[in-house]
Amino acid sequence: NGVYDNLTAKENGYWLLDLSTQEKFTEYTYQLNLPKNTVINYLGVYAVESFESKDGFKITGHVTDRPFKITIQYKQELIEESHLFLMFAGAIAILVFLIWIFLKKKKPVKKYHKDKFSDREFMIITLLQKNHGCMTQAELERKTNLPKASLHRNIASLERKGIIDKTEIGMSNKICLR
């Protein structure tokens, strides 16, 4: 197995293998193995007994009373590495995007000291933390059992302290931790 300059040549991407002689043989058997992704342009032999192409080409033949002749012109196609690169780059991009989303959602949970807030204010902060930082004012009213006016005063106090943001959404307010 090797490359011999006098038997092979390459031109315009095509390999030419010429193992021909004018000398006549009473009998000979040959087997020609070509690598994967080979495209055969020309095959010059006297007889082909089998032609397999699962892992590259395997060509065999048996010839009697003829000169030795095997001439083949072929091209080895390269696997499209650009497709592999694009798939790899796409997978990396998706992975980076998923990590970014995960890290973006994983905001560090702020710790609020109970002694800096009234019991009602601390209860509102705790409920907001348990509900991913946001709730409607109506949900807070149901969960805290506070009257609307008391809840409104406590929300206004937390808003002044810079702990929460209040956003009007239709007939209700959305309360979110900052």
Image (tube, grey):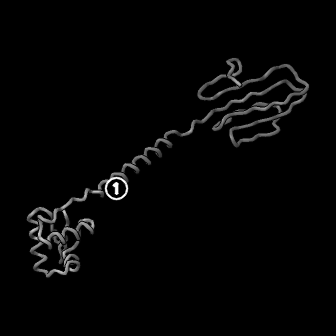
Label 1 element class: helix
Residue bearing mark 1: 102
Q: Nearer the viewer, residue 110 or 53?
A: 110
Specify the farthest residue to the top.
6
Q: Locate residue 178, reporting x and y percent.
A: 18, 61
Image vertical order of residue 66 relative to residue 105, above or below? above
- Which corner quadrant of the image does residue 176 belong to? bottom left
- Which corner quadrant of the image does residue 160 belong to? bottom left
Q: Locate residue 55, reporting x and y percent.
A: 68, 40
Q: Locate residue 22, reporting x and y percent.
A: 83, 19
Image vertical order of residue 39 relative to residue 129, above or below? above
Q: Nearer the viewer, residue 136 or 12?
A: 136
Is 123 placed left or right of 73 in the picture? Answer: left
Specify the farthest residue to the front.
115
Is 46 placed left or right of 104 in the picture? Answer: right
Q: Amino acid at mark 1?
A: Phe
Q: Nearer the viewer, residue 140 or 59?
A: 140
